[in-house]
Image: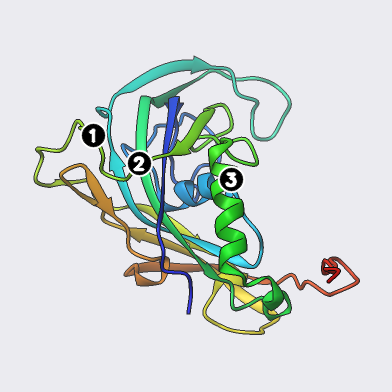
Amino acid sequence: MGNRKTYSFRVTGRRALFTDPVNRIGGEKMSYQIPTYQALKGITESIYWKPSIIWKIKRLRVVNPIQTETVGVRPIKFNSSANELAYYTYLKNVNYEVEVEFDWNKNRPELAKDWNYAKHEAIFLRSLKKGGRRDVFLGTRECQAYAEPCEFNSGTGEYDAIDELSFGIQFHSFIYPDEQDQIEVDYGELTVNLWQPIMRKGVITFLEPEQCTIQRVITKRKVKKFTPKHNFTYVEVNK
């Protein structure tokens, strides 16, 4: 049984670029209108993460109006060191409220000693108050973001009066081999999930990755193991 307590934070930034990683190889990029589950999970992991926990995104609130701006850039070509010209379409002046919770990664029984609710909660809240343990960005590295604690659904938002707004089929998330519902396996499936997000009064309630009805297995990968005294050590507490 995981930790069912939820935590909320606000993430803001000048620009954001949320695209489909399945086909984002090169060329001109255009952002989704809303962040993906996987992007929000990455933001949360930048605030705080340990391999013994899995972050789950519960809800997203879009506070600012959805606006875009197109910028001319000179990215490096995929198969050479030369530059090329491209236009990237970013979201601008974004402001999101995110509600999350964490659960234990049952594929990591060797880290069971680290399944301590109070410990992870305290470290996460302390890290969030400081803006995160690592750099936070919105979809891609050039879109720097700022995270801070907040009360979910507080204040006014641009879409509070909009009953329902659909965004069509979009990328949702990956299910990584070590996050599958299969315990103690050497190889696991890397699965991509798609879904149809609907925003109601500014709030999007996310499905969990396993609940997405549009899924495809991309490949199988060996699950990395954590072995005591080999690639990690327990912290001994002197009593």
Of the 4 image quadrants, the one containing the C terminus is: bottom right
Compute the Cα span from label 3 to label 2.
Answer: 18 Å
Residue 137 or residue 109, whichever sits in front: 109
Q: Residues within 10 Å of mark 1 (few under 14, many from 20)?
A: few
State the CA–CA distance, disc 2 to disc 1.
Answer: 11 Å
- Whichever of labels 2 and 1 marks the residue nearer the N terminus, that label is 2
Query: Residue at the spot x=27%, y=33% of the render?
Result: 63
Give the numbered dot on residue 126.
3
Q: Which mark is residue 155?
A: 1
Name the residue beneath numbered marker 2.
97
Give the amino acid type for the residue marked by disc 2 in the picture: Glu
Among the two numbered marks 1 and 3 on one chain, the one whose residue lies closer to the N terminus: 3
Residue type at mark 1 is Gly
Residue at the far top: name it. 72
Contact flag, marks 2 and 1 (Cβ < 8 Å): no
Question: Front-most of 60 and 71?
Answer: 60
Residue 89 higher or lower than 39, as above or below: above
